[in-house]
Amino acid sequence: MKLPARHLVLAVTALALCCGRVINRGPTKEQVTGALQAEAASMKRDGEKLDPSLGVKATWNITGVDVQEQAGNAAQPYKGAVRFRINSRTEDPTGPVETNFDKTFNYVYDAKLGKWLFKP
């Protein structure tokens, strides 16, 4: 059976359009995890920059960076958490005073903006 030329052209054009189309599924879990790890490193760096006149030295230790997929949520396909163990040290007339505490910061990945957003 021989197809008319116009049907053949239409079939080839449709096939080319379908095969050439790239479906954007957004970033992978590994990609957004790397971005959240970079955010955690930035928070650590900023958290340890205290005014020396305050007499407080803080050490932020990253204890975890977790990313979870949110199925069915195309606007925010991932949620994440950054966990820190923070050591705060001050000098008191009776000697050094240390305080240790854990702090967790929650985030959602905004697909439209392509970045993590802090979620209070």
Image (cartoon, helix red, strand yellow):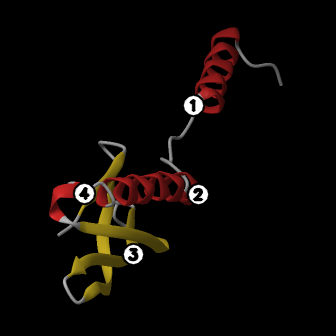
Dot 2 and dot 1 residues touching (CB under 8 Å): no
Earlier residue among tags 2 and 3: 2
Q: Nearer the viewer, mark 4 or mark 1?
A: 4
Residue receiving disc 2: 30
Secondary structure category for the residue under label 3:
strand
Residue located beneath label 3 in the image: 84
Q: Residues under labels 4 and 3: Cα distance?
A: 17 Å
Residue at 39% x, 75% y: name it. Answer: 84
Residue 64: image location, x then y, percent: 49, 75
Q: Decide which of 19, 61 is in the foreground and name it.
A: 61
Q: Is residue 76 left or right of residue 66?
A: left
Residue situated furthest top in the rendering: 5
* Res. 4 image quadrant: top right
Residue marked by disc 1: 21
Q: CA distance from mark 2 to mark 3?
A: 21 Å
Most foreground residue, 54 or 118 = 54
What's the residue type where badge 3 is placed?
A: Phe
Which of the two discs, 1 and 3, labels the residue nearer the N terminus?
1
Q: Is residue 38 left or right of residue 109?
A: right
The answer to which image quadrant residue 52 occupies is: bottom left
The residue under label 4 is: 50
Alpha carbon of mark 2 to alpha carbon of mark 1: how far? 24 Å
- Identified at 35% across, 77% down, the residue is 86
Badge 4 amino acid: Leu
